[in-house]
Image: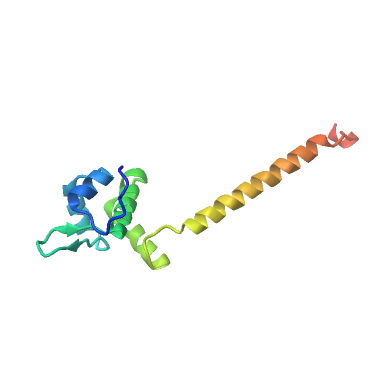
Amino acid sequence: MKEASGRLYYSIGEVSEMLSIKSHTLHYWESAFPSLKPHKNQAGNRCYRPHDLDLLKRIDKLLNDEGYSIEGARKQIEQLKKKDGQLALNLKVQNKSTELLEDICTDLETIIRDISRQPRTELDG
């Protein structure tokens, strides 16, 4: 998958190439997912914005990586919209979870190190 260049709009061909998704699949997803509504210019050509790219990446992940059906992926997208009011993943929550797990691992390593330093007692057998 190629990275977006920070532009405001991308053509369907550019999006197809960036995301490695065929343009006819993008057309189908547009009809299957009401949330996906790329802007159309005066000539009627689709102009995908960065938030459209984010949505397409999420749809692709749900369908092709997580194994959802179209209907299941549509429900997941709608739940995300209701829950967050937007389709972006909350990276802060993910980062906080990672931090918490790292802290727990560090604490466990310290406990294990401390336990291994204690002399054996009669109860240890």
- Residue drawn 90% across and 34% down? 122
- Residue drawn 53% across and 53% down? 95
- Residue drawn 27% across and 63% down? 35
Residue 82 percent coordinates (x, y): 38, 67
Does residue 15 lie above or below 82 as drawn?
above
Does residue 58 lie above or below 84 as drawn?
above
Q: Is residue 87 left or right of residue 21?
A: right
Q: How many numbered dots are placed on residues in this image?
A: 0
* Quadrant occupied by the N terminus: top left
- Hey, which residue is sitting farthest left in the picture? 43
Residue 123 percent coordinates (x, y): 87, 36
Return the residue nearer the eye: 73 or 100. 100
- Image quarter of residue 41: bottom left
- Hey, which residue is sitting farthest right in the picture? 122
Q: Is residue 50 left or right of residue 14?
A: right
* Quadrant occupied by the C terminus: top right
What's the image's color scheme?
A: rainbow
Residue 56 percent coordinates (x, y): 29, 53
Does residue 40 lie above or below 114 as drawn?
below
Return the residue nearer the eye: 45 or 31. 45
- Hey, which residue is sitting farthest top in the picture? 125
- Residue drawn 27% across and 46% down? 19
Residue 109 percent coordinates (x, y): 70, 41
